[in-house]
Image (cartoon, rainbow, N blue to C red):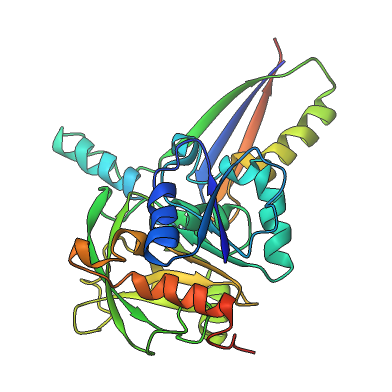
């Protein structure tokens, strides 16, 4: 099975990278862009297990290593293969 | 005194620190590879600057799980003196030995220049030979030095005199323009509540002897060693 894990800056945390991308999009003429926030996507292959077990493991991975809970949030999708 | 300097894959200020400890300060520096399980009875520990694990995922996030870090955390919890410089500061944050986190510099650039910092607390084991309010000129070299913490933690840092260094101009004014990276409250360095762990972004090891034309960093190592040798009493 596969999991997609998204790590994003918490709301209200300054995101200078997102801001720079937003400015660049405006320079290219994409005036419809109102706001850009940047984050990370991790695609993780997992051994087959129940969704509950996978979710518990993913939450633990995020809290221990993948996200810094001071500044980041995480969410995930489990993708059946 | 025996000072242990932890070497992670990607550390690049480890030898500079060892040089200052041994050749400038006249003490013994021991480079300790991150896979070692023990600190071998060191008197104090330095986590040096660099790019441990290529700064992958987040700065310091992978180094924080190196085998040696269990021993460093235990040493710190027992009151041992731990100094984290630049990437070392980032590792201390990731390890939870200091509160808060680092964001990308507000201006996005990697900044490599001299910065002025003001000593906000001169009664720590790392600043006890400084004067309160003393202004130091130290080089900074980082892309992720934009210190952030939530408002409650920030109030706690202020109330407990845990903010040890703040970015300022050459006259000591902490202004927005003297803040190189966007750090909250111009923070350049903090200590833990117990006072035995310090992290700072500037590099004192790069300006601790006359040949560099700037010796402002010397006072940090002098304070650390004075604390250890008892030449200056540790604050209660």
Residue drawn at point x = 74 percent, y = 40 percent:
A60
Residue drawn at point x = 72 percent, y = 39 percent:
A59
Q: From this viewpoint, is residue B170 visible?
A: yes
Residue B170 appears left or right of B133? left
Residue drawn at point x = 20 percent, y = 71 percent:
B177
Question: As displayed, is residue B49 above or below residue B156?
Answer: above
Residue B199, given in percent of the width and then of the height, sits at 49, 64
Quarter of the image where one finds residue B119: bottom left
Residue B196 appears left or right of B128? right
Number of numbered labels in the structure image: 0
Q: Nearer the viewer, residue B234 or B123?
A: B234
Quadrant where the N terminus of chain B is found in the figure = bottom right
Q: From this viewpoint, is residue B186 visible?
A: no
Quadrant where the C terminus of chain B is found in the figure = bottom right
Question: As displayed, is residue A29 above or below residue B20?
Answer: above
Question: As displayed, is residue B211 above or below residue B176?
Answer: above
Question: As displayed, is residue A32 above or below residue B174?
Answer: above
Quarter of the image where one finds residue B45: bottom right
Residue B37, given in percent of the width and then of the height, sits at 72, 43
Quarter of the image where one finds residue B79: bottom right
Q: Nearer the viewer, residue B38 or A15?
A: B38
Residue B43, given in percent of the width and then of the height, sits at 63, 65
Residue B143, given in percent of the width and then of the height, sits at 33, 49
């Amino acid at each position: 099975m596969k999991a997609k894990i998204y790590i994003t800056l918490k709301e209200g945390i300054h995101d200078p990278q997102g801001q720079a991308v937003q400015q660049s999009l405006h320079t290219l003429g994409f005036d419809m862009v109102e706001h850009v926030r940047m984050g990370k996507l991790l695609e993780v292959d997992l051994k087959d297990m129940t969704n509950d077990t996978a979710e518990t493991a993913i939450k633990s991975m995020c809290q221990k290593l993948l996200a810094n809970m001071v500044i980041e949030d995480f969410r995930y999708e489990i993708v059946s293969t | 005194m025996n000072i242990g300097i932890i070497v992670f894959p990607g550390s690049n200020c480890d030898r500079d620190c060892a040089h200052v400890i041994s050749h400038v300060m006249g003490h013994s520096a021991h480079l300790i590879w991150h896979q070692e399980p023990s600190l071998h009875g060191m008197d104090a520990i330095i986590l040096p600057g660099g790019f441990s694990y290529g700064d992958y995922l987040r700065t310091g996030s992978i180094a924080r799980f190196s085998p040696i870090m269990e021993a460093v955390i235990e040493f710190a919890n027992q009151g041992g003196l731990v100094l984290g410089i630049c990437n070392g500061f980032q590792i201390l944050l990731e390890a939870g030995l200091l509160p808060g986190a680092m964001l990308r510099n507000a201006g996005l650039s990697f900044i490599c220049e001299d910065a002025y910092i003001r000593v906000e607390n001169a009664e720590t084991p790392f600043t006890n030979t400084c004067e309160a309010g003393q202004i130091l000129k130290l080089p900074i070299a980082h892309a992720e030095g934009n210190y952030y913490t939530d408002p409650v933690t920030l109030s706690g840092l202020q109330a407990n005199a845990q903010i040890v260094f703040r970015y300022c101009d050459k006259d000591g004014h902490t202004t927005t323009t003297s803040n190189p990276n966007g750090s909250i409250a111009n923070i350049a360095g903090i200590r833990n509540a117990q006072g035995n762990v310090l992290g700072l972004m500037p590099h004192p090891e790069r300006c601790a002897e006359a040949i560099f034309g700037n010796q402002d960093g010397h006072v940090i190592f002098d304070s650390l060693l004075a604390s250890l040798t008892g030449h200056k009493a540790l604050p209660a």
